[in-house]
Image (cartoon, rainbow, N blue to C red):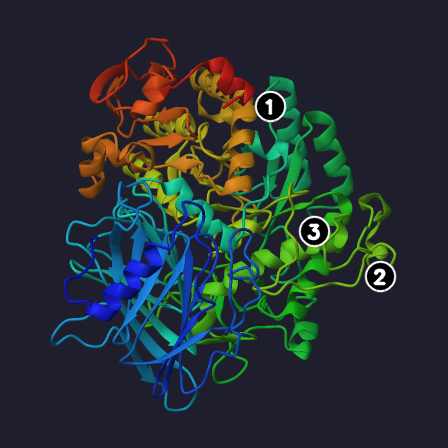
Amino acid sequence: MLIPYALGVTTLFLLVSVVRASAGTYFQPNSTGIKIQNGFERVYVQPYGLHGIRVRASLMRDPTETEWSTILDPPIEGPGGNAGLSHDTTISYLSNATLRNGNLIAQVSLGTISFYRVETDQDSEDNLTLLTSEFTDTKARVPRSYVQNSNSGSFEAMFDFDSDVDEQFYGAGQQACCKDSSVNKKGQVVDLINWNSQVRMPVFVSNKGYLQFFNMGAQGRLEFGPIRTRYVATEATVVDHWITTAPEGDYDALQRHFTSVTGRQPIPPDWSLGYQQSKLRYWNQSQVIDVAQRFHDEQVNVSLIVIDFFNWKFFGDWSFDPVFWPSPSTMVDRVKSLTGAELMVSVWPAVEDASVNYLELQKQGLLATTRDGTGVTDSSNKVYTRLIDSTNPDAREFLWRQLNESYYSFGIKNFWIDEADGGTLGEQYENGGQKINLLPYARAFTQYYVGTQEGSGKLYPWFHQQAIDEGFQNLTDFRTSNDDNNNTDLNLLSSPSDINNPMTFPSFRAQSPNQPFTPFTTCPHLSLTRSTFIGGQRFCSYLWSGDTDSKFPVLLQQITAGVSVAASGISSWTLDIGGFTGLDIDSDEGRELFVRWFGMGVFLPYTRVHGNRLCNITVPTPSIPFPNLCSNEPWAYGEDNFVILKKYIALRYQLIPYVKKLFEMLHETGKTIMRPMYYDFSLSDPFVRNGTRSNDPRIIYQFMMGPRLLIAPVGEPGVTTKEVYLPKLPQAWIDQRFTWTHWWSEKNLGSGGNFVNVSAGLDEVPVFYLGTKEDIFSGNI
């Protein structure tokens, strides 16, 4: 039994007795919960979800159970639902107690909580592995530490847990562009604050076989120190964290457990798995129709065309400027007839006082405010703006009604909820667009309906995504377990005036984070977001990595960003193919970078082109905001490259059955789509395990797309070959006669554990597959 030598005899007996009660099947909880009463501190330890335990700590009073939470109650799988603060054991700080759920044990000894895994596959049924414990030392500060705010019931909290010196940590959300290329986060300090491209989340996965999640919307930080991991919440009333375990190396099981308590990704519509075309920006409807016509004439498949920002007249109108978009329904019909493609429109949360909606939003109190009054939260395009307070259900209803009237009712049913990072319009500074913007604070001191920026700011994008999902569910024929009468037919909503007809627009029903609607199985439409939070995967939404630099090193850095956010439970992810800014479409370097990036993009969950391009153009620029006239379509990168890009686009459509199957598995079990090397090969290949620990570029700059495809993108200019490490296959895969096969040459390269040198022309992104192409193309995996 692998337990700390310092545990007393009583504690040791409790652990052994709980473990030996196992009968070889799922161990149902031996307790409804433990309450630790430590003077002013109350701590609840309860079983929750598959092999999971939830811990909630508060000061002076019990948790209210109304704290904002992204944990589902009840969970999709596992025990613990609808339990409230129930417990059958109350102990003082100096007492001991043990709780087991499945193969996870929480042991309370002298006020300190330790977590163990029961190793059911070992010869002895009472074999335990210590996963982590609240950190203690002779002279260390206590592991649960609080600083009470003098003017409220909230506090700053610091929770410490021990970690092994050589332990690896993954996840923590998506790191910001563009220098952080880490997969293993050990040694880092992670700032829990949202901005453009930084989507950090308080969740991490250990290579020891556990996942820990802080169910907190607070700003703060994660510190992955040599022997201690610390979570800091800037402001909280309850510290709520959850932990689960699985056999070492079984990361899919950890994701299954995690998404059973935070939600599963609905299956996206089929069209979204094809090619998505976007640029900054198409600024009138004739340009959109012209682009669709060109795709039709060139006989190139396209599934989505995106209308970017400033399609409105004023921030907060949430409607087309009729000067440039006189007949949206005509545009939608024309694009559909030419290409079959859907349209998506950009929606910002910003509101300026010239907007037709400003006074009504202000009167109803639906705008986020600053701590000392109405104030502003940011500026853009030379005007000051405020933020619609999407944490308020009335604000979400107001927003959706505008979107329905202005876009949805004309056939534009997909929304790009850009700049929705919260607090401001999303940069890591205030006063954007003005000469002085590097003010000495990273976020406005915003006050929301649900609380302050410090205490709730991480939740803002989550609520903003929710506004769109609520709209989908109120408008479509989706039925929920809460309201069997909600069966509106989409075909009944034929004009903007129908929004006021209760027969076609049911009473708007807002979700709450801990008691949401039954989620969609298959999404009717999609929203694209620049930020999210834990649980955002249960919306019909996908995340992209923000405004990235158009550089070869960033192409590779995006792999580490993608696999990190995937390890955090968000597999519905994409990026700007080509990067967002700095790519010249008329330069050889820019064209090469775009094609290289596109080759990788074919093998992402979504294949999406976007960017603010540079070009050699002499046409007069119109005096409108951001009118960029440079092209970003496949034919804009030269005739030779157009041939290659058409080849890649055709391949993407061949891969749709495979990608759809991956999303089906994601929906059913939380199985990660974009997979770092350690996911599948850390047990079979020491080189992968050690390379991940050191963030070796030879390991972290390649990934698995599902269980059958390995992609190793080219991240430097001017090369025609690439040396790729093929991981050693697990024995179970070898027993299935799987070997690595080069995608383009069909050369069998064996069972891995070695480097290979392969051709890597612009039209041959290094890709290797397992099994047969027939199975991949059919989705039979």
SS class, disc 2: helix
Residue 591 placement: quadrant: top left
Q: Which is more N-terminal, label 2 or label 3?
A: 3
Camera-side residue of 155 and 354: 155
Kindly identify which residue carries mark 3: 472
Kindly identify which residue carries mark 1: 301
Kindly identify which residue carries mark 2: 500
- Graded by Cα atoms within 10 Å as few (under 14), some (14 to 19) or many (20 or more), the crowding at tag 3 reads many
In the rendered image, residue 519, in percent from the top left (x then y), is placed at: 63, 51
In the rendered image, residue 119, in percent from the top left (x then y), is placed at: 30, 46
Q: Which is more N-terminal, label 3 or label 1?
A: 1
Q: Is residue 748 above or below residue 149?
A: above
Q: Is residue 579 visible?
A: yes
Q: The disc labelled 1 sits on which kind of residue?
A: Asn
Furthest residue toward bottom: 151
In the rendered image, residue 442, in percent from the top left (x then y), is placed at: 36, 68
Q: Nearer the viewer, mark 1 or mark 3?
A: 3
Camera-side residue of 312 and 117: 117
